[in-house]
Image (cartoon, grey):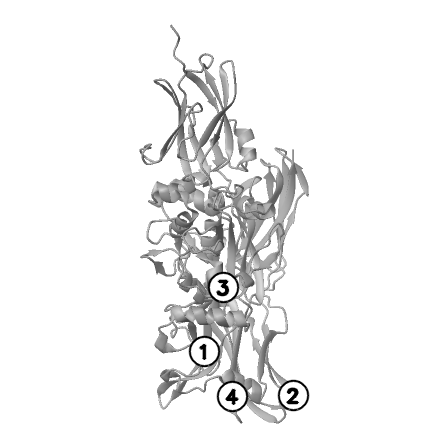
Amino acid sequence: ARTDLRVTGVDFLKSQNTRLHHTDAYNIKNLVVRRGQPFQLQISFSRELRSDDKLALRFGIGEKPMKIRGTLLSLNPRREPDFSGWQISIVKSSGKECLLSVTSSPSAPVGKYTLNVKTGSNIYKPESDDVYLLFNPWCEDDVVFLADEAQRKEYVLNDTGYIYVGSAYSIYNRPWNFGQFEEFILDACMYLLDKSNLRLSSRRDPVSVSRAMSALVNANDDSGVLLGNWSGNYDKGTSPLDWIGSVSILQQYYKAKKPVCYGQCWVFAGVLTTVMRCLGIPSRCVSNFNSAHDTDENLRVDIYLNEFGEKLNRMSLDSVWNFHVWNDVWMKRADLPSGFDGWQAIDSTPQEQSQGIFQCGPCPLKAIREGDVYLPFDSKFVYAEVNADKVYWIVRKVNGKEKYIKINTETQGIGVNISTKAVGKDEREDITSQYKFPEGSEKERKSMQKATSFIRPPRMGMRARFASTVPAYDAESKPGVLHDTVSKTGLQLEITNTEPLYPGNPLELAITVKTSTPGSWTIDLAGSCQLQSYTGKVEASLGYVKETVTVEGNSEAKIPLKIAADSYMKTLSLVEDEVLIHIAAIAEVQETNDKLTNETTMRFEYPPITVQMPEMAQLNQEFACAFIFKNMLNVPLDNCKLLVEGLGIFKMATFDQGDVKPGRIIKSEVICTPTRVGEKKIVAKLTSDQIKAISTEKAITITE
């Protein structure tokens, strides 16, 4: 009698499979593969395999895998392929060994599959039987297919990068460790997929998955990953400025299974990039400068100034953030009419509910650019963030009553210098043209007309830049004031700093008013300086200047505005957010009653952190890395902390440095043992009471 065929072992051939699937970097003992691409398994049997033996590999996903639901796949190399889109074949069979090739469907649900092997009535369950199946940007039949290898390296495999912050004309990069391959990160993403309550069939689809993840990265509805906090008080958690990457956030979340405190927009975007890249969906962080947070989708943000040019907080529901960071993800949109494939915006910062949940996107960039804002998801909201108008009002007391006078409408200030990290280079790439047509072009006008027809109730008429009628509440103002101003007097306002803006030094600012038409003009000028957080919230008013100047013909007058250090240093220490310097100016020409306003935001400049280490090191060989900081400011920095992390080199470490007096040098050292080859980056960040974040990074090449 013939003996039963039993399986005695399964070899997942991990190193060869993961190399071919670009998954060899994942720090996990299980096999991780991408869908739609073959992988091999070596099966050992109790005896030689005969042609009449029954053999089936069974892959199951979810709580109760069932064939009828398509969540249990029974693959038999001797039978015709089934309708599931999975394939299996015998590569070679010799003696008691059999090499099999398995190809999953390019539209298979993404997640954790269990594997067992059935021979006749025997079932064999291998050790670490979970196989992780991811989206595959390398596979032409996968909807996340990305043709360009350099882009796949950046948007899927790069585990470090930058997030651009600051203000529109003073942009700087914050290094960020995405760390999608680090320990527990893939498991945290699988936990989020389970938590999302997406049906298994929806897990095939990156549209559903990216939308669900935009909801789960914030804690608002579903005790997701991060709790947002913009209050300026972070005692009960970690300040949003103290993170240098997603790894410690996702590890902490996975361990405790409850929201991590605290995040602001760049933290949400950094974590969402990690989750998307980890699951295999190409993703990038996108920073929109002068981002409109327009609460009622009417495409305008009203900004109220007092007579000194100081912004009034209490007035506005809508606001302009210095920057806002969200994500783009790459996919085909089979759910939409053709032409909307490619980059889609998603946003996990909790701002506005969509279908009852704090989630946003995916919304095709092409729909935003072309004005097709009726397309899902949340395209009206994203459109407003990059296209609203700014309307400036001056609030004056007249006979004890507040009176609102419209100064001007600025149509080009919102949604500028939209930025992401360039592919394969440590540089900023401007992607504004992927979100909007050039300002003032015919295409932009057409797109704007299309968008406003969907956004505004028709009786409101077109937007300011096409206004032929002025709504009744604007009665104080003449339509098209801006153009009159420019034509009558050629009035212009410029705001500059005349000395570097170091904390502890006086802020030396200047407001320049220019005219370019003949005649003598008397101009009332007001200018103010305030400290504000990146969401546009005023933290302190530091001072103002109010003067009347006479300008002859084609000339200019420069008015200095100087703020003493002690008038702002206290605010710097008290506010736990990084603050920006906001300057606004109002000019009124007495002869013509023309009004103009201008505002700008600048950031403080800081001394650098220096990193000393070799340029090359060997795998598993120790080397030393030193971080040096000299306080070149003339004020002490209190409670200094140095945070450092090097993915694949050393875990996150924190050094408490106490108070650092002017001129003092601090030095910290880490002994590193690299665990992965290739170019690696070390990121360092210094925080203190006065300065919230000085960052730097340095690259090192690790060889075998």
Image quadrant where one finds the C terminus: top right
Of labels 2 and 3, earlier in sequence is 3
**Which residue was labeled with disc 1?**
464
User: Which three-letter amino acid code belongs to the residue tagged 1?
Assistant: Ala
The residues bearing labels 2 and 3 have C-alpha atoms spaced at a distance of 39 Å
Seen in the picture, residue 416 relative to 281 is either above or below; the reply is below
Residue 626, position in %: x, y? 63, 46
Q: Which mark is residue 594?
A: 4
Residue occupying the point 56% across, 29% down? 16
Of labels 1 and 3, earlier in sequence is 3
Residue 29, position in %: x, y? 48, 31
Q: Which mark is residue 554?
A: 2
Say few, some or many: other residues with alpha carbon within 10 Å of mark 4 (under 14 / 14 to 19 / 20 or more): many
Q: Look at the image and tell me whether residue 414 can be seen.
A: yes
Of labels 3 and 4, earlier in sequence is 3
Horizontal relation, residue 277 to residue 671: left or right: left
Image quadrant where one finds the N terminus: top left
Q: Residue furthest top?
A: 1
Q: Residue furthest front?
A: 80
Q: Which mark is residue 34?
A: none
User: Which three-letter amino acid code belongs to the residue tagged 3?
Assistant: Arg
Of labels 4 and 2, earlier in sequence is 2
Nearest the camera: 94 or 274? 94
Residue 501, position in %: x, y? 60, 68
The residues bearing labels 1 and 4 have C-alpha atoms spaced at a distance of 18 Å
User: Which three-letter amino acid code belongs to the residue tagged 4?
Assistant: Asp
The residues bearing labels 3 and 4 have C-alpha atoms spaced at a distance of 34 Å
The residues bearing labels 1 and 3 have C-alpha atoms spaced at a distance of 19 Å
Q: Secondary structure at mark 2?
A: loop
Nearest the camera: 326 or 4? 4
Horizontal relation, residue 542 to residue 618: left or right: left
Q: Which mark is residue 369?
A: 3
